[in-house]
Amino acid sequence: MALLIQNGTVVTAEATFPADVLVEGTTIREVRAGIPADGHTVVDASGLLVLPGGVDAHTHLDMPFGGTTSADDFETGTRAAAIGGTTTIVDFAIQARGTKMRSALDTWWKKAQGKACIDYGLHMIVTDLGTSGLEDMDDMVREGVASFKLFMAYPNVLMVDDATIFKALQQTSKNGALVCMHAENGSVIDVIVQQALAEGKTAPVYHALTRPTVAEAEAVQRAIAMAEIAGAPVYIVHLSSEDALNQVREARDRGVPAFAETCPQYLLLSIEDQMPGKSFEEAKYVFTPPLREKKNQVKLWDGLKDDHLQVVSTDHCPFCFADQKVLGKDDFTKIPNGGPGIENRMQLIYHHGVNAGRLSLNRFVEITAAAPAKIFGMYPRKGTIAAGSDADIVLWDPKAEHTISAATHNMRVDYSMFEGFKVQGNASKVYSRGELIVDDGRFIGETGRGKYLRREARGGAWS
């Protein structure tokens, strides 16, 4: 028996229109007005928006970092994502130095197996190209890992040199994959950090104050320059500042295939409001890049509206305050970097974007679903409402009101970065491959039902 969603308003990146959606099995079969019931199971979506399931292209579930592990695993993290209207994530496998990328891929598959509640892809974090690393990259592409992340920060941990970055970019120019860059000048930041510690500046606020926006902008410019030389596209992750955005905009204006994402925390939180330097509670907002001055927010919103920024992801990497963030009580460099957000991305961007008049409905769908699906090789299977696409569908209630709080959220972390934020607009029902998995804020799907997505390398298709 097929599923028929009637009387809703379908929203894609391109159009908004009244239509019915017919789902057969795991796939959307037809989208048009007036589809007859014909014995189908009918869901009345009157007053609701029919959206493609959200795609969060930047998460860190069950990730070791700084002597601990992120608090959400693939079960709790993907369940929270689904409740918030996200039906696909792309997480990060981490290559350990001196090992093959295949080992990291196997490890992350095991982390997700029997736990993932929604479909997931994997990026590969490259730490060591070694003697066969370039061939490793080609092997990963064959396994559906169509993107690689390299770090220009965290010396002696994740940071690689420019030669490694350039070789990786050259390889992706051949195999069609995409390099994602964590762009901060880690060497310069490390000097500033050590100087701050020597002066006794150990509080959480100094995490932000030792990572200037110019260090981000310089690294973004350098990453783009290397990509240009290699003839490869590049994607800047979690861009946080106007200085860095200027570098991306200038490159795109010249026709360079440079892409970038930002995150809700950079659009809505600030060093002035969340990190005034008054208590260790501010460790809740220690992530990298750090919070910026509030003046950056309007520029980032403009960047999203004008397509200088293409995607909103979360960089969801939660660490509990009570027993994880406190590891840095006397030294901000020991505070595990990361914050929770996988559950609230769609709510926050809808409310502060669409309701506030900063974004159109179609642009909202573009930056939360369609663009990440396109950039990371999942479109049109994911990211749109169209015949032949996976039936990843969110029935969105634009009038539903919700207050974000750690007391009621589903992420396995003891605080919310957006505690007390009131939003209007929320997921009412969430379908993943045609299966109802969330109903009125409750996850009713089966744990472990999520499937690994073999993503396609896009090659020259970088418009």
Image: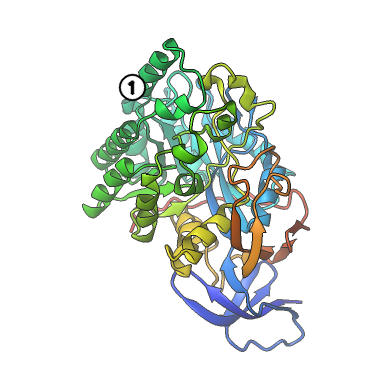
Does residue 115 appear to the left or right of 101 in the view shown? right
Residue 292 location (% of width, % of height):
41, 38
In this view, the residue in front, 463 or 354, is 354
Residue lying furthest front: 278
Residue drawn at (33%, 22%), measured in percent from left and top?
Answer: 188
Disc 1 secondary structure class:
helix
Q: Is residue 459 visible?
A: no
* Amino acid under disc 1: Val
In the displayed structure, would residue 399 be above or below residue 458? below
**Quadrant location of the C terminus in the rendered image:** bottom left
Colouring scheme applied when the structure was drawn: rainbow
- Residue 402, image quadrant: bottom right
Horizontal relation, residue 299 to residue 285: left or right: left
Q: Nearer the viewer, residue 426 or 2?
A: 426
Which residue is depicted at the point 49% across and 76% down?
16
Residue where numbered disc 1 is placed? 188
